[in-house]
Image: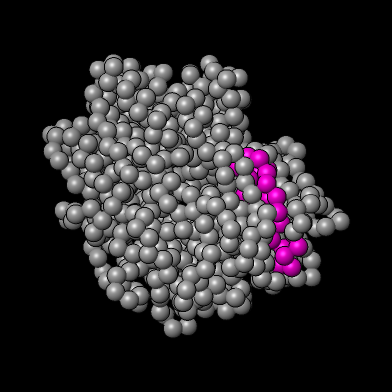
Amino acid sequence: MSATAAGTAAPPPPGTGFRVYRPALPEVCPRDPARMALAADADGRCEIFTWNAATGTARQVTDSPDGTVHCALDADARVWWFDEDRSGLGLWYFQDFGGGPRHPGLTGLRPGLPCGLAVSDAGTVALGLGEGRSMTVHLGTPGGPARRVRTVDGPALLTGISPSGGLLALSGAAGSDRAVTLVTCSGEVLDRLSGRSGRLWALGFAPSLSASELLLVQEDDDRYRLASWRPGTGLRPLNWCRFDTEITARWYPEGRRVLIRQDRHGRSALTTADLDRRTLTPVPCPPGTLLDAAPHPGDDVHYLWTDTATPPRMRSTAGTRLPALPVLPAPAPGRHRDLWTPGPDGPVHTLLSEPDTAPDGPPPLVFLVHGGPADHDRDAYDPQVHSLVASGFAVARVNYRGSTGYGPGWRAAYGEGVGLTQVADLVAVRTDLLRRGLAREDAIGLWGTSWGGYLALLALGTRPDLWQAGVAVKPVADCAAAHRTGTPALRALDERLFGGTPDAVPGRYARSSPLHYAADVRAPLLVIAATRDVKCPPGQVRSYLAALREAGVAHESLWLDTGHDGYTGTHHVAALQRAMGFLGRHLRRTPRPTEPPVPRRTGSWGAPARPAPPGM
């Protein structure tokens, strides 16, 4: 979830005048495309709404003090949502599109982590719930008793149910990102699919009842290609449908056609693939980033478009009426361009944003470090970029090695070690910006969240003389401790990156851990952490802060009573205000307090009373 920021007025109290949005399109009812459901802003937190495109009216479905973000809409127009607590544990519920009582998705279940929801055309619902180091799939009719189908080890996901309800697709079973398992409704394994030289993941079953065809993506050598699976014929790679960077795809409602969205070098493209004719047809869309795209009846394609200067906009190729996102001034302030820096595994791509005017030389520069590592910075609106540029900072967003959008080879390039490879890229870009006269040696800071916060801490400790300030939000600070207490998915990721557990390869974890370098930090540091964080647990952050205190390192800390992925604007604005003020004090030539820009409220979009317009 992100929060939008705009304007230059002084900020109101936390949680007011601040909107949140989720960069995902509305879920559309297969039998009535005018009925939609989405996560949208409700007084500074995400909640679930319905949207009727025929009447242009909305209704708020959920009202949780901590927000709600996961939702779905089935063929019978039931709105589904995952009701979770601050630690991320919860259960699925549903309600009729028009309202009425809420019902449990299935009865007799204990709260768990959301690991997938699928509803068949036959009315069967399958729920995936994570519990400890395993995931269990439960089956039943909506509102009826749950029947356990299968429990698998590791961070698996339920990725689809066939239209007839007879088959389930599970990705990542046994902690492998190279496996997809096909399971019958009785829990028997029908087939196990494996990616021989790379990852393999499922995208869902075709909507046709006539055949159970599963769509997949295969990583092979230095390409990504579509593949399909049918009972009796097995996995069939579609070698004519290959791309050099990451793709995802969705089935069209009719025929054997899919809509492919490709992320490449920080931008996106859409292509329609006809699986029978073996043709690829580009779908026109404006330059920038497509945060989401989905095909609908009548060849209508809904997509969520943005670029660095423009907040997200929902669009339809057929002119379908879609919910309006928050209206912010566009374009956002600043000048935006791409830079490429030579590196050992190829050029490193940076998205650079600068204030419109810099009368006395280069402005202070902030490296805004993305998380992941399987993610990338995009030519897309970012409220932190907006706030920094509007306050007189330049912003560098670096797609370091390990980022997505540059091919399998780039994503797997960790030659200097986990974290250390990425820090080397940040340092190389810093040197390049100084050489180009775009930065000043005495005014360069780091700001990252999650894995980005980890890299900020690691850079501050391993290259302490290069930075004048650092902000780490919900970071990994001790790699071994985070592995022991983190989620199954992140433990599996660690073991792939490091080549084993902390007990098996302790030296690798120590060498890449910010805790190992805490005493070497020289720049002023702000650490923002969350008391209920299960991805970057609070205990390992407290150990890092204790090491800073013991070494006499100047630092500040802020604790939020939330999980890793907060759904409320209050937490976002608290972190934004604190970080902006901190960077302003330590990076400006003439230190002065700075306040983050925030949006002006512009009224509602048709929902009664409180809700404001929607928006990932």
Whether 354 is drawn above or below 482: the answer is: below
Report the residue that reaches farthest toward the bottom: 55
**Residue at point 53%, 60% (across, down):** 92
Picture layout, residue 213 above or below residue 197: below
Residue 262 vs 513, above or below: the answer is below
Q: Locate residue 272, reporting x and y percent.
A: 65, 63
Q: Residue at x 18, y 34 (%)?
A: 585
Expressed as whole percent of the image width and height from the top left, the position of residue 383 reads 33, 51
Residue 153, magenta (yes or no): yes
Residue 365 shows in the view: no
x, y percentage for residue 523?
27, 24
**Residue placed furthest toward the right:** 232
Q: Is residue 395 magenta?
A: no
Q: Position of residue 115 (x, y in %)?
A: 58, 51
Say left or right for 576 vs 314. left
The magenta segment: 149-173
Q: Is residue 482 above or below residue 564?
A: above
Task: Return the residue nearer the eye: 278 or 72.
Answer: 72
